[in-house]
Amino acid sequence: MDASILHEDDTSMELAVFNSVDRDEAIRTLTPCLDISRWVEAIVDARPYASVDELLGQAQRAAEPFTADEVESAMAHHPRIGERPKAQTTEAAMSRSEQAGVDPGDNHTTAALAEGNRAYEDKFGRVFLIRAAGRSAQEMLSALQERLTHTPEEEDTIVAGQLREIALLRISGLISEGVNA
């Protein structure tokens, strides 16, 4: 992303700027929020937005529903809960920030999350996904244990919802109203 269009802290872009950048730049801006091309393009192509709330509303509408293939593709970009991605990408930085509630020094919870992740992957064939932002490691572990009791169909619905929540939170952190809002 062109550093000149981001705030000094390199974490957000004003809505007016997002509305005015070319389509390719807008796509590059949103893709780390959720790498589903149809979703990103639906948001970008609906510009301009009068407010971040309007942008978030379009993001929500574009996410309903995600197809099974879209969910599967997007899941490839999400690390296991408790494992911090090492890559230096925008998406990896977002993930590290979102998982701040997982204390690597809490060996008991970290081990329980690792064990739960393995059980979840064995049962459902994919990583356990949860909106980690704002949740403690214990809350995530409790949700993981509860979700292990679900059917694959129930989990498909929950995972799509978690992807939406994560994407909307990421947009909220990435696009700001700006100084004139």
Image (cartoon, helix red, strand yellow):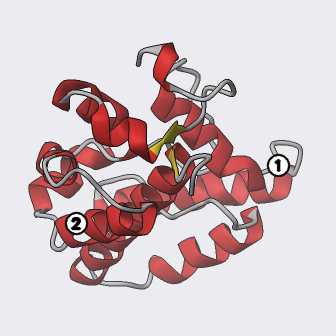
Q: Quick one: which residue is furthest to the right in this view? A: 105
Residue at left offset 72%, top offset 52%: 111
Residue 66 image offset from top left, x and y in percent: 16, 65
Residue 30, image quadrant: top left
Report the amino acid beneath label 1: Asp
Image quarter where the N terminus lies is top left
Report the amino acid beneath label 2: Ala
Mark 2 / mark 1, whichever is N-terminal? 2
State yes or no: discs 2 and 1 in contact (Cβ < 8 Å): no
Residue at left offset 87%, top offset 51%: 106
* Camera-side residue of 21 and 95: 21
Res 32 seen here: no
Q: In the rendered image of this protein, does residue 175 appear above or below residue 52?
A: above
Image quarter where the C terminus lies is bottom right
Q: Which residue is mark 1?
A: 103
Q: Is residue 180 left or right of residue 147?
A: right
- Measure how far apart labels 2 and 1 are at the Cα level: 31 Å
Residue 45 image offset from top left, x and y in percent: 13, 48
Q: Which residue is mark 2?
A: 63
Q: Is residue 164 left or right of residue 39?
A: right
2 or 1: mark nearer the eye = 2
Residue 7 image offset from top left, x and y in percent: 61, 29
Residue 142 image offset from top left, x and y in percent: 65, 77
